[in-house]
Amino acid sequence: MSRPRHTRRILVRGLVQGVGFRYATVIAAQRFGVTGWVRNRRDGTVEAVVHGAPEAVEAVVAWARRGPEAAVVESLEVTEAEGEFSTFEALPTV
């Protein structure tokens, strides 16, 4: 029997580029066992799609509310998303 999986899109605003947010998100995703991707956006935000067990996805969302040490997260938007992924990777800026 397969466990339920959730997919969420996270959009992070604040001082979140140039502080290692993407790299730290990859590490957090690996630690919590989720798949998906993260990327910088030209508007200064960081966007991620996270897929996995509900509690693991929520752990990544909770982590993203703080981000890495140098980040200043002003707001975090979480919405439902679709997709399944085999890894978690940092994508190029869009």
Image (tube, rainbow, N blue to C red):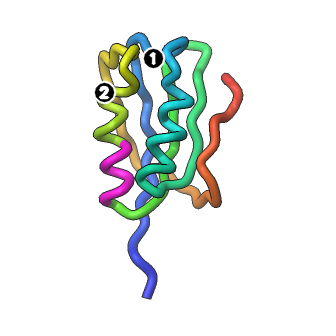
- Taking the magenta stretch, the answer to whether it contains residue 11 is no
Residue type for callout 1: Val
Q: Residue at x 34, y 14 (%)?
A: 72
Q: Residue at x 39, y 64 (%)?
A: 53
Q: In the rendered view, would you say 16 is above or below 85? A: above
Foreground of the two, 27 or 10: 27
Q: Quadrant of the C terminus?
A: top right
Q: Which residue is mark 1?
A: 16
Q: Main secondary structure of the magenta part?
A: helix
Q: Which residue is mark 2?
A: 66
- The image shows a total of numbered marks equal to 2
x, y (%) of residue 93? Answer: 67, 23
Report the side of 65 relative to 2 (left or right): left
Foreground of the two, 66 or 51: 66
Foreground of the two, 84 or 68: 68
Query: Which of the two labelled residues, at mark 2 and mark 1, occupies the earlier sequence position?
Result: 1
Q: Residue at x 67, y 34 (%)?
A: 91
Secondary structure under the numbered disc 2 in the rendered image: loop
The magenta stretch is 55-60
x, y (%) of residue 35? Answer: 54, 54
Residue type for callout 2: Arg
Q: In the rendered view, would you say 31 is above or below 17? A: below
